[in-house]
């Protein structure tokens, strides 16, 4: 039992740890080499306790950090000689990691000769040694076909010095070795920032206060979570979704489900993912970390945003998984190459949209996902300098889910990321890679209509500036686009095609796989839109008018979907709007939740 902790000091130390993680984040962002890290910000930083509980994650991506505790467990279980100056490289999805492309650097932090904390950086690699030049190999039949280099929490530094054997392995198998090594150094450097700052913190406040703070902070966070759950009604919610057919799946797609049980008298919530298909013969399988992170992200989106994202809060939330399950704990050698995206996005959507069934004001709609060519991994040789390149571009965003209070964001990127990834800069991508981006624009009427509108889709068009640029991608949601809730409409489905630069009939490209985009061709990529929340006929007419003036909603949709009449002067016709809404309400009948 810890002593009563000074609440002022509790706040000071909580913010100090948060600041340390943010300093780690800034250090990694500014020093990494690959644009998927230093532009799109596809990485996360965190601090664990010595007993492997998540203490601080600041703006960590949910699918990266919510299931981070097992990373520390692996370090402890696999090494009995951990000491100051060590660092470990971990990307094993069959242990505690997310997928092979997420390289984690773990640094045990010693204070007064005792291991008290562990710094974690997790950075998505543009190339991790896959047999294809991509980090999302959704069609890989097993981990051997996937081909990634997998390091089960191996020591990569001893006494603050690289273990050259491991570094040489990476440099010999990764297509862009200098880019990888720069990202590796940036990750190690970020973790060492945490090491220095936490040691300074312990020197300033005393080791005893820092140790006692941890349990006091977890207890405080747990009380906040308990109080929030106690305000909910007792209910069992069942949600389901279907992932589009991919190679290795049933022709009808992958049907997944979740049961969310809210027990306010106990102050607890559980998410049961066990009743789902067995591991699939492709790269869609989730890992323990990604299934846990996706479920937690869905739950936390329905609870107050002031809840700390740490192990204290998570004590009140149970995620039930099954070994050998596609959305559970994978069995080797099933591939988890796309384990941070496709099915994980569906799990987030299932959980957060289930909450909307409680009542108006709860939950949110479904957010868009998928890897259209605007978010492809591009690769090839840059004829301008003769260098090979592999990198994921994030030129086009997807539509975010509408909530009870706000419209969805068009820069959402995907559910598992919680809108924390950034868009690429068009100018930077054109400078770094041999592509020319003709267009990046939002698509009118693509966000699901609702009292709150879903986020709009993006339309991106680009061409190669060399003989060939290889795109590796996976379009998802074409057959099962994001759904709205409480009468909200679904978001628009994604599209993609290729045509000649001079203009020609569109030519279809595969839904998932590779496409060699050749000189003289351009790819047109339209991402999905997000689902809407609530009846569109309840949307404020002034908000509809703003959308029309901004080009987010067409005048036709304003009239036919939202029932808003805009007169020739550009103002709202109140009488015409009232009559049209009555007519639409009658024709649609009652709107289901």
Image (cartoon, rainbow, N blue to C red):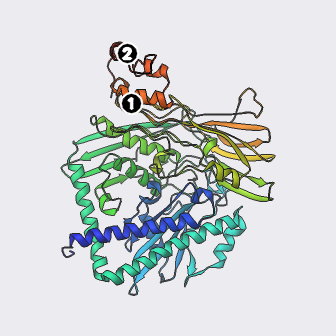
Q: Residue 267, relative to residue 57: is it above or below?
A: above
Question: In this orientation, does residue 131 appear?
Answer: no
Regarding mark 1 in the picture, which secondary structure is present there? helix
The mark that comes first in sequence, 2 or 1, is: 1
Determine the image quadrant of residue 129: bottom right
Asked whether 87 or 405 is in front, the reply is 405
Residue 489 falls in image quadrant: top left
Q: Is residue 59 left or right of residue 357?
A: right
Q: From the top left corner, tell me how far across and down residue 63 is, in percent.
A: 46, 54
Element carrying mark 2 = helix
Say which of 234 and 182 sits in front: 182
Residue at horizontal 50 percent and vertical 61 percent from the top: 97
Q: Residue at x 34, y 17 (%)?
A: 574
| Image quarter hosting the N terminus | bottom left
- How many neighbours does mark 1 have within 10 angstroms: few (below 14), some (14-19), or many (20 or more)? few
Q: Is residue 342 depicted above or below 390 in this figure?
A: above
Which residue in the rendered view is the most extreme toward the bottom?
113
The quarter of the rendered structure image containing the C terminus is top left
Q: Position of residue 20 (x, y in %)?
A: 42, 70
Residue depth check, mark 2 versus mark 1: number of the one nearer the observer: 1
* Number of numbered markers: 2
- Residue drawn at (30%, 62%), measured in percent from left and top? 312
Q: Characterize the local packing of mark 2: few (<14), some (14-19) or many (20 or more) Cα atoms within 10 angstroms.
A: some
Residue 463 in sight from this viewpoint: yes
Q: Which residue is mark 1?
A: 543
Labelled disc at residue 47: none
State how far apart marks 2 and 1 are (Cα).
Answer: 19 Å
Residue on which disc 2 sits: 584
Give the residue displayed 37% in from the left and 43% down from the top: 351
């Amino acid at each position: 039992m810890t002593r009563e902790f000074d609440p002022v000091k509790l706040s000071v130390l909580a913010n100090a740890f948060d600041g340390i993680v943010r300093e780690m984040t800034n250090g990694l962002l500014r020093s990494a080499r690959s644009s998927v890290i230093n532009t799109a910000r596809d990485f996360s930083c965190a601090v664990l306790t010595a007993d492997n509980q998540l203490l601080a994650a600041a703006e960590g991506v949910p699918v990266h950090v919510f299931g981070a505790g097992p990373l520390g467990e692996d370090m402890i279980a696999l090494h009995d000689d951990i000491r100051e100056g060590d660092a470990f490289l971990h990307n094993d999805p069959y242990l505690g990691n997310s997928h092979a492309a997420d390289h984690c650097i773990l640094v045990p932090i010693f204070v007064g000769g005792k291991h008290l904390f562990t710094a974690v950086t997790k950075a998505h690699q543009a190339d991790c040694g896959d047999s294809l030049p991509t980090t999302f190999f959704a069609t890989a039949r097993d981990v051997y076909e996937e081909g990634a280099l997998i390091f089960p929490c191996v020591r990569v530094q001893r006494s603050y010095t690289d273990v050259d054997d491991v570094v040489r392995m990476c440099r010999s198998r990764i297509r862009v070795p200098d880019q990888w090594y720069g990202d590796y150094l940036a990750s190690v450097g970020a973790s060492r920032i945490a090491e220095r700052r936490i040691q300074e913190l312990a020197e300033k406040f005393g080791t005893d206060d820092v140790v006692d703070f941890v349990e006091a902070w977890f207890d405080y966070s747990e009380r906040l979570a308990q109080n929030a759950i106690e305000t909910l009604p007792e209910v069992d919610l069942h949600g389901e979704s279907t992932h589009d057919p991919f190679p290795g799946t049933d022709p009808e797609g992958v049907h997944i489900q979740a049961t969310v049980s809210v027990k306010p008298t106990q102050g607890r919530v559980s998410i049961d993912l066990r009743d789902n298909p067995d591991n699939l013969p492709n790269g869609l399988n989730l890992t323990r970390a990604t299934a846990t992170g996706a479920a937690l992200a869905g739950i936390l989106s329905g609870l107050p945003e002031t809840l700390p994202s740490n192990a204290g809060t998570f004590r009140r939330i149970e995620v039930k998984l099954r070994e050998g399950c596609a959305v559970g704990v994978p069995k080797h050698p099933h591939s988890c190459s796309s384990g941070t995206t496709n099915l994980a996005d569906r799990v987030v959507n299932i959980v957060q949209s289930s909450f909307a069934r409680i009542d108006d004001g709860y939950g949110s709609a479904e957010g868009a996902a998928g890897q259209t060519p605007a978010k492809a991994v591009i690769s090839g040789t840059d004829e301008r300098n003769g260098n090979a390149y592999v990198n994921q571009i994030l030129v086009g965003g997807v539509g975010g889910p509408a909530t009870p209070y706000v419209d969805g964001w068009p820069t959402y990127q995907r559910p598992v990321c919680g809108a924390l990834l950034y868009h690429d800069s068009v100018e930077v991508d054109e400078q770094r890679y041999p592509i020319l981006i003709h267009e990046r624009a939002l698509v009118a009427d693509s966000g699901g209509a609702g009292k709150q509108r879903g986020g709009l889709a993006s339309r991106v068009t680009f061409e190669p500036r060399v003989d060939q640029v290889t795109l590796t991608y996976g379009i998802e949601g074409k057959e099962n686009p994001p759904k709205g809730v409480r009468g909200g409409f679904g978001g628009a489905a994604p599209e993609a095609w290729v045509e000649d630069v001079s203009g020609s009939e569109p030519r279809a490209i595969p839904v998932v796989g590779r496409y060699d985009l050749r000189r003289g061709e351009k790819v047109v990529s339209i991402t999905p839109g997000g689902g809407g929340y609530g009846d569109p006929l309840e949307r404020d007419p002034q908000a509809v008018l703003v959308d029309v003036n901004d080009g987010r909603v067409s005048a036709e949709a304003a009239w036919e979907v939202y029932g808003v009449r805009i007169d020739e002067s550009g103002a709202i016709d109140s009488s015409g709007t009232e009559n049209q809404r009555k007519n639409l309400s009658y024709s649609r009948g009652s709107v289901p939740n």
